[in-house]
Amino acid sequence: MINFKITPIVKGEKFDISYSFFQTSFGICLVASTKEGICNILFSDSKQETLEDLKSRFTSATFVHKEESVHKELENYFKTYSFITPIMFHLIGTPFQTKVWQALISIKKGTTSTYGEIAEIIGNKKSSRAVGTAIGDNPLGYIIPCHRILRSNGELGGFRWGIERKKAMLSFEQDTSVHYS
């Protein structure tokens, strides 16, 4: 079960963020959390690159390299693709971003959508570009399935963590022998 606490971005707001790394079939995963829940899931081939990405998102935060119990639960998710216990996620974004991210969650495993379809879901048909920007800022890689978004012509389009990783995620979801929530 996925539970979200949504906090609007407040310029200069201070957060204490714990982070740790683990390996997934999609590369190195950095998981970061506040006291409210997991706030970022990022992928990379480099721990340093991923940590710099995290720090650029929260310029006023204090960071501690510490594996929290919720990080272990998320690591287990990437092994079993199911949650044993509910995990709390802490989305930090603008109202528009969180609306887009919530729309992404409605895209079922094994299916895809387009930027335009997401714009329609959120009630703003002409906001495809802004939707694309919000999708690119998705803080919870894979959990909020931004990898399921295609261009209107069916092409993969861009992906924050590279097209090859996007292809791997989509391909993985097509594997019907894997059961996950």
Image: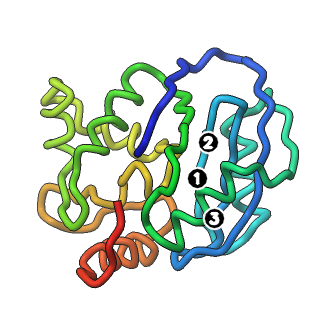
Residue 29 marker: 3
Q: Residue at x 65, y 74 (%)?
A: 23
Total labels: the figure holds 3
Question: Please, what is the three-letter code of the amino acid marked with disc 2?
Answer: Ile
Question: Please, what is the three-letter code of the amino acid marked with disc 3?
Answer: Cys
Residue under label 2: 38
Residues under labels 3 and 1: Cα distance? 7 Å
Residues packed near mark 3 inside 10 Å, few (<14), some (14 to 19) or many (20 plus) = many
Disc with the residue nearer the chain's start (3 vs 1): 3
Q: Residue at x 40, y 45 (%)?
A: 1
Residue 178 location (% of width, % of height):
33, 79
Disc with the residue nearer the chain's start (3 vs 2): 3
Residue 132 location (% of width, % of height):
33, 43
Contact, mark 2 vs mark 1 (Cβ under 8 Å): yes
Residue 27 versus residue 151 in the image, above or below: below
Describe the element under mark 2 as helix, strand or loop.
strand
Residues under labels 2 and 1: Cα distance? 8 Å
Q: Residue at x 76, y 32 (%)?
A: 59
Describe the element under mark 3 as helix, strand or loop.
strand
Residue 41 marker: 1
